[in-house]
Image (cartoon, rainbow, N blue to C red):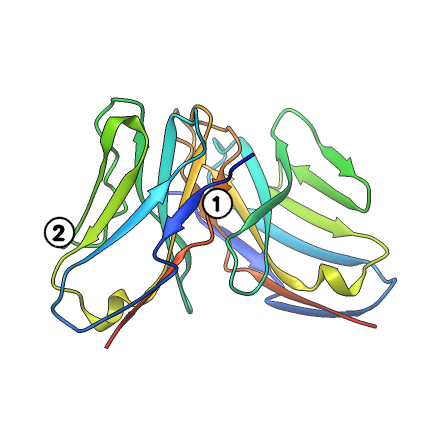
Amino acid sequence: GENVEQHPSTLSVQEGDSAVIKCTYSDSASNYFPWYKQELGKGPQLIIDIRSNVGEKKDQRIAVTLNKTAKHFSLHITETQPEDSAVYFCAASTWGSQGNLIFGKGTKLSVKP
Amino acid sequence: GAGVSQSPSNKVTEKGKDVELRCDPISGHTALYWYRQSLGQGLEFLIYFQGNSAPDKSGLPSDRFSAERTGGSVSTLTIQRTQQEDSAVYLCASSLAGGADTQYFGPGTRLTVL
């Protein structure tokens, strides 16, 4: 089955710097890759996603890139702000009609003011 | 609009007791998922419902876990004879039609088994 590896497990940056989180997946049939942000005591919230028919997607300060050949995808956050501090999860969707997500272990991002 | 809601937000129980966790998906969403989030294990898929089809139970960790979805809307996850290793946050998500549709998560139920 699908396996998703996420790195780093913790990341600390200064406010205004960029942050990059990387994930690799094992199942070449996976075709949907969302990123979720989880704040303490809350459920995961989708921040951006990408499907396998595109290589990059941007939404203001957030971007995701996908390399299908290498089976890895990355989250890029520019001009980080203290409110970006949270745990970020990448995920991959297994092929087929169900779509149950296989998650990475998460990255705890701390943005220092 | 209203998002996914879950109740209770916290549940403390004694080992061996049964518990029921409830999920109200977003209105109109036909797909509903349960996940478990525990320290060191990340987010694990448990069960998936799509419309009136038979659920995919392939992620349930043991036969003590079961779930149902009544009328294609509200879902209940039941854990019988709870064990300490069942302590975790149980998350529910719904999507419009399953597949690669965006999944929206509820706030979760934190279960503590003493």
Q: Amino acid at mark 1?
A: Phe
Residue hosting label 2: B63
Q: CA distance from mark 2 to mark 1?
A: 25 Å
Q: Position of residue B57 (x, y in %)?
A: 23, 40
Q: Amino acid at mark 2?
A: Asp
Number of residues whose C-alpha sits closer than 10 Å to that of mark 1, classed few (under 14), some (14–19) or many (20 or more): many
Residue located at (77% from left, 37% from top):
A58
Task: Locate residue B19: give its quadrant.
Answer: bottom left
Number of residues whose C-alpha sits closer than 10 Å to that of mark 2, classed few (under 14), some (14–19) or many (20 or more): few
In this view, the residue in front, B72 or A99, is B72
Task: Locate residue B30: give its quadrant.
Answer: top left
Q: On the picture, is B51 further left or further right than A50?
A: left
Residue located at (32% from left, 31% from top):
B73
Q: Position of residue B62 (x, y in %)?
A: 17, 54
Residue hosting label 1: B105
**In this rendering, is residue A105 above or below A12?**
above
Q: Position of residue B69 (x, y in %)?
A: 25, 34
In this view, the residue in front, B25 or B37, is B25
In this view, the residue in front, B86 or B27, is B27
